[in-house]
Amino acid sequence: MIILEGNVINKVITGANGDFSVGNFTTDIGQFKIRSTLLDQFDEGEYRVRVSVNKIDLNSYMSKRNGIIITEMELDIDHLECIEGDVKPVIDAPIEPDVTETPPPLESKPEKPAKNTRDDSGETKPKDSRKPAPSDGDAELAKLFGLLWPLGDVVKLDSTMPRPLFIRQKDYLKSAGYTFNGLDQTWHRSPVH
């Protein structure tokens, strides 16, 4: 295992599974690509980071635009630590291929009308709406987040999850108003005003 420190320029790419990240990592020993779930939570920008490298691979792919074969040194990392909280915007970055798998789509089912219940006198009354029953959406979210469900005010995602699932979790947190803190890599629920 090798520990490297440097600057990563994180570029967010829209792919078949949603947004994912590709990092151009510049260190004292060279430049590398990082395609890791660990970067998927970060917004576009330049970050000062320290990474734990498992292995270095040579990766090639063909550009769809002009048919050129591109070869890169790619790092397989299992830990990423953001050293500085300042984010510098990305000015210009090359287009990257979508190399992720396609996740199964979230199924959305229409809401069922409230059922009527009978009281002791035999009369039919509408179901009490003060106690919300678990909805199909809650069941889907429980399936998506597993042991993290129900979500608290602070959520730390498991980066060892399959990348398509991790991307769906991240996308849900963003849409639910959570904000990402890069220094401790946790999601925080925004306070309601």
Image (tube, helix red, strand yellow):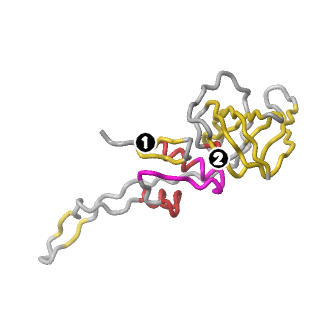
Q: Which amino acid is tagged 1?
A: Gly
Instruction: Say whether residue 137 is visible.
Output: no
Identify whether 136 is placed above or below 17. Answer: below
Disc 1 to disc 2, C-alpha distance: 20 Å
Q: Position of residue 86 (x, y in %)?
A: 57, 31
Residue 124 quadrant: bottom left
What residue occupies the far left of the structure in this picture? 121
Asked if labels 2 and 1 touch by Cβ distance under 8 angstroms, the answer is: no
Q: Is residue 6 left or right of residue 66?
A: left
Could you say which is closer to the camera, residue 186 or residue 143? 186
Q: Residues within 10 Å of mark 2 (few under 14, many from 20)?
A: many
Q: Position of residue 166 (x, y in %)?
A: 60, 51
Give the residue displayed 61% in from the left and 32% down from the top. 44
In this picture, which residue range is highlighted in magenta? Answer: 153-167
Look at mark 2 in the image and give the residue it sits on: 38
Look at mark 1 in the image and give the residue it sits on: 177
Could you say which is closer to the camera, residue 12 or residue 116? 12
Identify whether 86 is placed above or below 165. Answer: above
Secondary structure beneath disc 1? loop
What residue occupies the far bottom of the structure in this picture? 120
Q: Position of residue 43 (x, y in %)?
A: 58, 35
Residue 26 quadrant: top right
Q: Earlier in the sequence, mark 1 or mark 2?
A: 2
Asked if residue 154 is among those painted magenta in the image, a careful observer would answer: yes
Q: Which amino acid is tagged 2?
A: Leu
Secondary structure beneath disc 2? helix
